[in-house]
Every structure is written in structure tokens, then in C-alpha cells.
Image: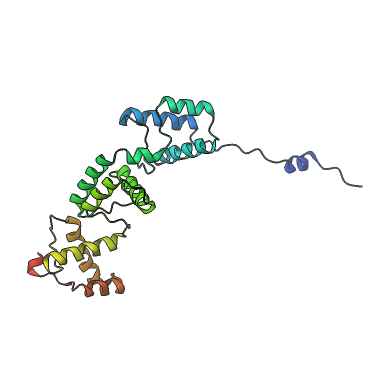
Amino acid sequence: MAKKRTARQVASTKPKRLSSPRHLPSWEQRFQELQAFKKENGHCNVPAVYPPNPALGTWAHSVRHAKKKGTLAEDRVRRLDALAFCWDRGPIIAGRWKERIDELKVFKKRHGHCNVPAVYPLDPALAHWVSYARHQKKLGELDQEITRCLDALGFCWARHTAWEQRIHDLKAFKEKHGHCNVPHRYPANPGLGTWVSGVRRRKKLGELATDRILSLDALGFCWERSRRGT
């Protein structure tokens, strides 16, 4: 005959009710943060990568996804509509392309290239737009005028790593000047001059990988700064 289970044993077999952790912000809190964002910026187009409030960008993305799947409550849809929330990121990114091109020109003037990092705190929207432009070009759906403007800026359609970008810049410098002795202060590409100095220092300290040394040797890189490189 089976033994009667105690009340404690019976309770332990019941499925536990899961509750949301108290430390997680509610939907209402995110909505209020979105209202504050709109008040400050004049729109609700929170970048996917938004350093001042990373979770808000993630939340905006999840809200769009839920709406697309039909799992977002109607009252929440209405409240977001009242804020003029844009449900499709594509038009948001493509619609301000002239402004983004201007921002990219500023970036190039500062860094000497157009390879905006995927995470760029100084202008998250630009980083996201650049990724979008590459994706649309790959699909063959990027507007021809945007393509021409980006080509004219020397935009690279395949994202480079930081090292690849500097090697690309160094090759361009050599093609123009006939040598790799980039001055430490090089107004046309300030970051390149700093990088060259750093590479020399790392080689001296034994911290530079052999394959990278060989790739620079192949370019005729001078490991000791010459007078014309000062």
C-alpha cells in the first residue's frame, strides 16, 4: 500500500510559478525612457546601439519584432503610434542618407578613412547606417545615388579589421609618396601617423606578431624613423 505523502512533499512536486525579476525594468519604464528620448531628440528612432541607454535600443528592436509577430498588445501599439514610433527601421536609416554622408565626411576627415566601427559611441546612428548601406549594396538594393556618393568618398564595401584598414591606408600613402615613412603628425590621416609610431614601438618591445612584421616588411616599411618621417 502506497504511503501517504506529506503536505511538504506534495507542495514540492507542484510546478513553481515564475515571476519577473524585480530588478528588470518594466515595459512602462522603457516607454517613459522613450518619451524622454523623443523630448530630447525630436523623434523615437533610438539607434540599435545607443551607449547612453543600451537597453532602450534593444527594447525598441524587440518591440518592432513583437509587433511584426503579432504578439504586441494593441494598447501598447496605440501608445507607440501616438508617439509616432516608426515600426520599420529601413526607412529610418535610408531616409536621412544625405545627413549620414555629411557625418561620414567628418569621420573621414578625422580618421582618414570611412571604416566606421560597428560600435561607435560618438555617433551610433552613423555606425548602424554604414552597416545597413553595406547590407543593401550586397542585396543589390542600395540607391544608385547613395552608391555613387560613397564610392566618391573611397568607401570600402567590405568591412576591414582595424589592422587591415591601417595596412590599406599605408599602401595608399606609399602609392602617393613612394615610401612608408608616415610622419607622426600627418594631417591627411592623423590616426595613421600614430599607428605607425605604435607599430614601431611594439616591434621594439617584441609585442608585434611575426605575420604582421612580414606584411610590413613586404611593403618596405622602415622600422627606424627617418628624417623625412619626422
Q: How many marks?
A: 0
Compared to residue 198, the image places residue 52 above or below, namely above
> Foreground: 132 or 121?
132
Quarter assignment of residue 176: bottom left
> Foreground: 141 or 27?
141
Q: Residue at x 48, y 35 (%)?
A: 25
Q: Which percent across, then down, holds residue 80? A: 44, 28
Q: Which percent across, then down, holds residue 142? A: 33, 47
Q: Which percent across, then down, holds residue 43? A: 34, 31
Q: Residue at x 39, y 52 (%)?
A: 139
In the rendered image, is residue 43 in sight? yes
Q: Which percent across, then down, holds residue 10? A: 77, 41
**The C terminus: image quadrant:** bottom left
Side of 67 where 13 appears, left or right = right
Q: Residue at x 44, y 27 (%)?
A: 81
Compared to residue 191, the image places residue 174 above or below, namely below
Side of 19 where 209 appears, left or right = left
> Foreground: 81 or 62?
81
In the rendered image, is residue 52 in sight? no
Quarter assignment of residue 5: top right
> Foreground: 176 or 170?
176
